[in-house]
Image (tube, grey):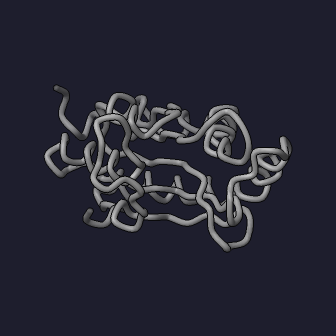
Amino acid sequence: MPRRRTLPIRVLAMGSDSGTDRIGFLTIHRLEAIGFKHRYPDNFVATAICRSPALLAARYAPARALIVLDAYCSSDPLGRVRRLAVKDLESKHRPSSSHGFDLKQALQLCTTLEGGNLPVSVVAISIGAEEDTTDTQKAHKLLEMSFPAVLNTVDEDIRAIMSSRSFSSPI
């Protein structure tokens, strides 16, 4: 296994291919289109998508740190960007099941697999009080509203890791 400092920071989008839940996917595609990972030397940043928290453990590894881009439902203004720690996420499955994990449980598993040493940041984009599966353009509108803040937040997280300051809070 390579030393942690030589592993890439993974920027991983969670979501689906439809509705406002695809904001993570649209965001990662925009980051790739602007050459985001080429801002950092020597493959320091890698990007990926993940369609289910149950698949997360297979998608992140190996990594120096994990930055997750995901939609969140709330009364916050549409497109608001928040940085969340794993401990701040709601857990929907109690007890957890081998047939499915929510995002919090999946990130806790990834961190545990790394001996508790995997810094994790969730960059969450508000999609409103509930997911909209009917408006095919809403996710694109949200991307336009949120992208500058997402870009700034992800850059801040990467700079913190590059300078060995952790951006994550304890699980």
Up-down: is 48 above or below 105?
Answer: above
Residue 60 found in image quarter = top left
Q: Is 109 left, or right, of 120 in this rendering?
A: left
Q: Quadrant of the C terminus?
A: bottom left
Q: Quadrant of the N terminus?
A: top left
Q: Residue at x 82, y 50 (%)?
A: 138
Q: Residue at x 61, y 44 (%)?
A: 24
Residue 64, x across and y down, in percent? 30, 41
Q: Nearer the viewer, residue 164 or 96?
A: 96
Residue 30, x across and y down, in percent? 69, 38
Residue 170, x across and y down, in percent? 25, 65
Inspect this view and state whether residue 8 appears.
Answer: no
Q: Is 109 left, or right, of 60 in this rendering?
A: left
Residue 86 found in image quarter = bottom left
Q: How many discs appear?
A: 0
Inspect this view and state whether residue 27 appears.
Answer: yes
Q: Nearer the viewer, residue 144 or 71?
A: 71
Q: Nearer the viewer, residue 5 or 118?
A: 118
Residue 154, x across and y down, in percent? 52, 53
Q: Residue at x 28, y 36 (%)?
A: 98
Task: Work out which residue is located at the far left of the displayed protein and give it.
Answer: 115
Q: Residue at x 30, y 42 (%)?
A: 97
